[in-house]
Image: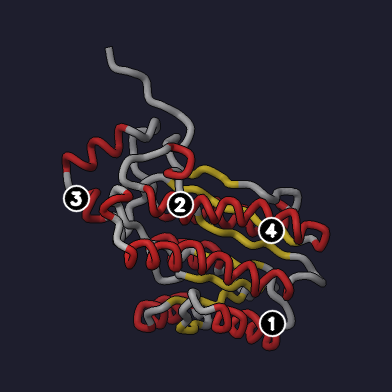
């Protein structure tokens, strides 16, 4: 039965992924930095959980190797850890920069670094999370676009490095998804209207929209897909709405 590691499992998108991945007999190790919501989700889904700071390479190594020691394999590794700082570059502090790079890019790199060697014998799927802001060029998204642009480069390079071993590396790039992290923006009517208008499908995403794409990339039926960044963004990344008459 499949064995997966999920980083950022208690977040809005992460918890939707956890629910989508959980099938009878499957194992999904739920990890994240905050224990209480992980414990609650684990109880709901009857899955193991572990407090983990995925910015720490050794901690991620230990989590992956521990999962393999217990179950003999790891089939999927997903990183849903992320953060958003919406500021122009000149107002982005060094601390803002360090935090966003660590949370978004370092965690992704740490997961690839730890999971790929453990998948070399049997293959597997690694799925990371980018953002439509990398493709769209959105004002005040400089630092998050820089971090997630790094994630997209990582996806393509790692897909090339590990493909011969049957290891697939892909990412999803969401638009604005309604989660606790984005709720303040969604609740601001003026900002919400402006943002919604940038999505050609005229709605914000839900965590389940992104989770369905992630589980598709993880599923063993899709073993000929690698090095891809799948936009799950209501059209934000590449499509522009019609001008009103």
Disc 2 is placed on an element classified as: helix
Write down the residue under mark 1. 68
Tell me, yes or no, whether the two marked residues, 1 and 3, touch with CB atoms within 8 Å. Answer: no
Between discs 1 and 4, the one toward the N terminus: 1
**Front-lying residue, 87 or 3:** 87
Closest to the observer: 114 or 95?
95
Q: Secondary structure at mark 3?
A: helix
Label 1 vs label 2, nearer the camera: 2
| First in sequence: mark 2 vs mark 4 | 2
Distance between mark 1 and mark 2 Cα atoms: 33 Å
Q: Quadrant of the C terminus?
A: top left
> Residue at the spot x=34%, y=43% of the render?
204
Of the residues under marks 1 and 3, which one precedes in the sequence? 1
Find disc 4 in the rendering and name its residue. 158
Residue 88 seen in the figure: yes
Please identify, in this view, whether the residue under mark 2 or under mark 3 is nearer the observer. Answer: 2
Which residue in the structure is indicated by mark 2? 146
Q: Pick the residue in front: 234 or 236.
A: 236
């Amino acid at each position: 039965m499949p064995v997966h590691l999920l980083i950022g499992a208690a977040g809005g998108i992460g918890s939707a992924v956890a629910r989508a991945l959980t099938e009878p007999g499957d194992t999904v190790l739920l990890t994240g930095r905050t224990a209480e919501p992980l414990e609650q989700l684990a109880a709901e889904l009857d899955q193991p959980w572990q407090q983990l700071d995925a910015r720490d390479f050794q901690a991620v190594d230990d989590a992956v190797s521990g999962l393999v020691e217990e179950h003999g394999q790891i089939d999927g590794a997903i990183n849903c850890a992320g953060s958003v700082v919406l500021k122009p570059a000149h107002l982005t502090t060094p601390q803002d920069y360090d935090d966003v790079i660590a949370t978004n890019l370092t965690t992704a790199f740490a997961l690839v670094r730890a999971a790929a060697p453990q998948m070399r014998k049997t293959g597997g799927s690694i799925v990371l999370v980018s953002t439509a802001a990398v493709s769209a060029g959105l004002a005040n998204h400089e630092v998050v676009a820089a971090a997630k642009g790094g994630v997209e480069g990582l996806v393509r390079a790692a897909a090339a490095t590990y493909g011969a071993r049957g290891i697939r590396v892909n990412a999803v790039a969401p638009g604005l998804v309604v989660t606790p992290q984005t709720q303040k923006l969604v609740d601001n009517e003026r900002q919400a209207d402006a943002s919604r208008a940038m999505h050609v499908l005229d709605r914000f995403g839900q965590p389940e929209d992104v989770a369905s794409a992630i589980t598709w990339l993880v599923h063993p039926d899709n073993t000929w897909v690698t090095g891809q960044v799948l936009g799950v963004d209501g059209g934000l990344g590449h499509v522009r709405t019609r001008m009103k008459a």
